[in-house]
Image (tube, helix red, strand yellow):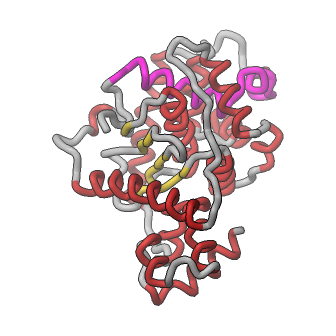
Amino acid sequence: MHDFRRLSPETVPPENSPELAFEIRRAYDRREWALELMADIEESPQSFDVRVTLGDDVEEAAGNLRESLHVSVAQQREWRTDYEAFKQWRLLLERAGMLTFQATDLELAEARGFSISVRPLPVVVANIKDAPRGRIFTLLHEATHIMLNEGGICDLHDAAVESFCNRVAGAALFPKEELLSSDVVRHHRRGERSWSQTELQEISRQFGGSREAALVRLLTLGLTDHVFYDRKREEFLRQYREQRNRAGGFAPPHVVALSSAGPLFTGLVMESFNRERITASDVSDYLQIRLKHLGDVQSEFAWNT
């Protein structure tokens, strides 16, 4: 693991934290366990074989990604909440042959996500402390790393790779033709480089990406400039910090465990348990949840499937 995706280059800590090392190791372990569980119940992993290179056209690469996920803009517009959009993108990635995990104890300033480009079952990881729409962009960014066969924890160490992954993720979230034909873009004053909060929010709502991701896409398409983008990005970063400071509440342990493990991995664990291939103690180890919460895990998983 050699590169990082963070909120901004200025947030780079002097060295990787123990929390980051733990999340990377956990992702590797869960992938190995998933393959073992599949073999034990005689299932084969879905093959994700979409490949791209840095020389490929961004729009074409994004189209290939969307095609592999079998997603349409009409579907995106049906997802009414941020969390529903995140859940659906996650399911689409897993059906295409990836494992999706969420890091739970990692500071957002250190890493927003990372990926493991090993087949079968490559892994993409998002930071649970990020906003749902931010996590969507991270998953698609990391999926692009998988297509490049460039796993890692993303940062700007390789500007060409990071720029390509950002542009493909943006193009996948906001397909060019549909974005340009949307009412917001069509009614925007021609040649005006600034975009209002209302405009960015409406684009975000329609396509399921964050306002920042929408702005990146507008920049890529030449509909804004770096002066406006840099100013708005600073504003978004300030808002992220304020939201984190205000964040409160407490999610039950079984909810955190399932959110971290993801639908595919959790499904393999529960299927193996129901077939009596593994014990309740094994479920506790795989999902990192105390045995007393097993009933809650079963109920939550059944409710979500």
In the figure, 282 relative to 55: above or below? below
Residue at 53% across / 11% down in the picture?
Answer: 55
Please indicate whether residue 252 sits to the left or right of residue 4 in the image: right
Relative to 97, is 2 above or below?
Answer: above
- Residue 167 on the magenta segment: yes
Q: How many marks on residues? A: 0
| Residue 106 visible in image | no
| Magenta-colored stretch includes residue 234 | no
Looking at the picture, tell me which residue is in the foreground, 255 or 204.
Answer: 255
Q: Is residue 199 left or right of residue 74?
A: left
Image location of residue 294, percent across then percent down: 52, 84
Q: Nearer the viewer, residue 192 or 92?
A: 92
- Residue displayed at 22% across by 56% down: 18
The quadrant of the picture occupied by the C terminus is bottom right
Where is residue 193? Give x, y as percent.
59, 16
In the rendered image, which quarter contains the N terminus?
Answer: top left
The percent coordinates of residue 217 (x first, y second) are 60, 25
Q: Tell me where residue 292 appears, x and y as whole percent.
A: 46, 89
Residue at (58% x, 40% y) in the render: 210
Magenta stretch: give its range. 158-185
State the image quarter where residue 5 is shown: top left
Query: Which residue is painted at 22% across and 51% down in the image?
Result: 17
Left or right position of 10 against 65: left
- Residue 215, visible in the rendered structure: yes
